[in-house]
Image: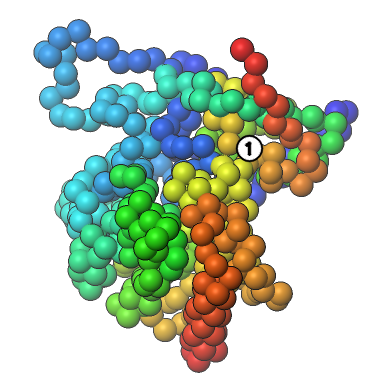
Amino acid sequence: MSKKRDAKKIVYESARDFPQMPMSQGSMLWNKTGSWRNIRPEIHLEKCTQCGICWKFCPDMSIVIENEFPAVDYDYCKGCGICAAECPMKCIVMVEERK
Amino acid sequence: MSKQKKMTLTLPTEELVGSGNLACQGCGANLALRYVLKAFGKRTAICIPACCWAVIDGPFPYSCLGIPVYHCAFETAASTATGVKAGLEMIGDTETQVIAWAGDGGTFDIGIQSLSAAAERNDDILYVCYDNEAYMNTGIQRSSATPTGAWTTTTPVKFPKDQPKKDIDAIMAAHRIPYQATASIAYPEDLYKKAVKAKNIRGTKFIHVLAPCPTGWKSRPEDAVKLARLAVQTSYFPLYEVEDGEKYTLNFKIQNKKSIDEYLKLQGRFRHLKPEAIAAIQAEVDRNWDRLLKKVTAR
């Protein structure tokens, strides 16, 4: 996936390395927002009807489509619970995060 | 899992808003830009004044958007977009679209002069106001988009806001711009359709999106989409389009209007309201709805 390739933090060794114009140099993918959550979604695919509603309403683009079924990208899921609340079949459950 | 059915996707799969952004959990503004950029595609430049999205996009060497972003001053979203569009036309690029993406503070209060000026000149830009009904980015201060009775840090429970929400859509309709619409994140197909329509119209376009903010509305993050849906179903935020300031089209016909109580009780910012205050809000919502129906039927 292209996400893994871009997930690098930009480090400037000295002031000379700064770009001349304040322009963005990379994406925010280094910021693993998955560490923000305290509840995590789990998808039980037995009941899934592939309606795509969880994918449609995810604010963090962390529901990805794998083999025509939804899967959660736990690197970036912030644990808001919109997917579990909106799933018409109730096949997404929010469980407590364990460390 | 033996079935090999295709997943039903009602929107394109191209994502121009990247993961790892700094939005709060359950952010409505994030969803709004995601749907608009799905419609606009890669050949777009976006101008963002000081608003939540100036933070969500990321700090200096990073940007979570896959398109060029111009961070401009608070009051200049529309005029910056006009300038970017003029510059593009000067170098012969007529294809690239320019979006001004401002919050409700940057549209209703601070940026209204530049928006009004751009609408008067009929510059070819799309102005999107994602409305989270207060200055959420700076710490939930009251704006002129805040509804009556809502708690904010500058209108505490003892002194709630008395004034109703400013009717920005009527103000924009008075400018006779080619296209304007209201949209909600709970109806992404509708928002996508409106963005595609706006893309194919030359002139100033205005879209007003209701974007729930769980942090500022003191609601649960998982209710964000539900709140946006209830706002439409209670006719608090009806979905309609206006062409040339005259032709009103209602997109979501409400058969059984829900009581505003259902919408208010999910939000902590309305917890202090007494039944009389709720009845007053209901009367205000009904009055606005009747006013809109008159415009739709008048043509």
Q: Position of residue B299 (x, y in %)?
A: 49, 89
Kind of element beneath mark 1 = loop
Q: Position of residue B280 (x, y in %)?
A: 52, 77
In front here: A27 or B260? B260
Position of A85 relative to A34 (above/below): below
Query: At x 35% / y 51%, what residue is drawn?
Result: B153
Position of B56 relative to B127 (above/below): above
Q: Position of residue B177 (x, y in %)?
A: 33, 74
Label 1 is placed on what type of residue?
Gly
In front here: B11 or B160? B160
Residue that label 1 marks:
A81
As drawn, the residue found furthest toward the right would be: B2
Position of B245 relative to B224 (above/below): below
Quadrant where the N terminus of chain B lies? top right
In front here: A69 or B281? B281
The chain letter for the residue carrying disc 1 is A
Query: At x 64% / y 62%, what residue is drawn?
Result: B262
Q: Position of residue B34 (x, y in %)?
A: 48, 44
